[in-house]
Amino acid sequence: MNSIQMVGWPIVTVSFNRPACDDDARQWLVDLSGLLAREQPFSLIIQAKPNSEFSPEARRELGLWFKENRIKLGAFCRGIARVVLSEQEGDRVVSDNMKKAMPFPMVSCLDFDQARDWAIERCHQTTV
């Protein structure tokens, strides 16, 4: 199993299964660029297993990618729903600062069904 799996369209589920090596993180950015290249609305559901973090170098590259693609993300990504294990984790991974930094809405959800329903609703809205 890959450390990062991305499946579905236009509701895209991203699973972080274990710590990602830098090459896995770079491939994920290529995959995200592919989503933006479609130039169609989509929503993301993110599930991360404990300890599925990125290296400092990969985090830097991710930050640069998000900065460079901010306009396209705002145009096509309708939102991200993070599946979390607790409200405390949700507050940490979908912090007010994170919400302000992203050009789309973000929520934390305690179960996958709730995240999926939110992502479907967001994806089908005509305006952000």
Image (spheres, grey):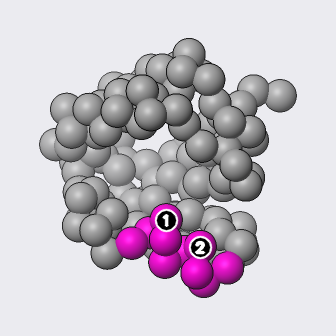
Can residue 91 be seen in this snapshot?
yes
Q: Nearer the viewer, residue 61 or 57?
A: 57
Residue 124 placed where, x, y %? 42, 63
Mark 2 lies on residue: 89
Q: Amino acid at mark 1?
A: Val
Q: Is residue 13 above or below residue 62?
A: below
Residue 107 placed where, x, y %? 47, 73
Q: Nearer the viewer, residue 100 or 76?
A: 100
* Farthest-out residue, top: 23
Mark 1 to mark 2 CA distance (whole Å):
6 Å
Say which residue appears at 34% left-offset and 33% top-offset: 60
Q: Is residue 82 left or right of residue 84?
A: left
Tell me the chief SS of the magenta region: helix
Q: Is residue 21 above or below residue 13?
A: above
What secondary structure is marked by label 2? helix
What secondary structure is marked by label 1? helix
Q: Quadrant of the C terminus?
A: bottom left
* Farthest-out residue, left: 71
Judge whether residue 93 is colored magenta: yes
- Mark 1 packing: few (<14 Cα in 10 Å), some, or many (20+)? some
Bounds of the magenta span?
Answer: 86-95
Judge whether residue 42 is colored magenta: no
Mark 1 lies on residue: 93
Say which residue appears at 73% left-offset and 52% top-offset: 49
Residue 112 placed where, x, y %? 71, 67
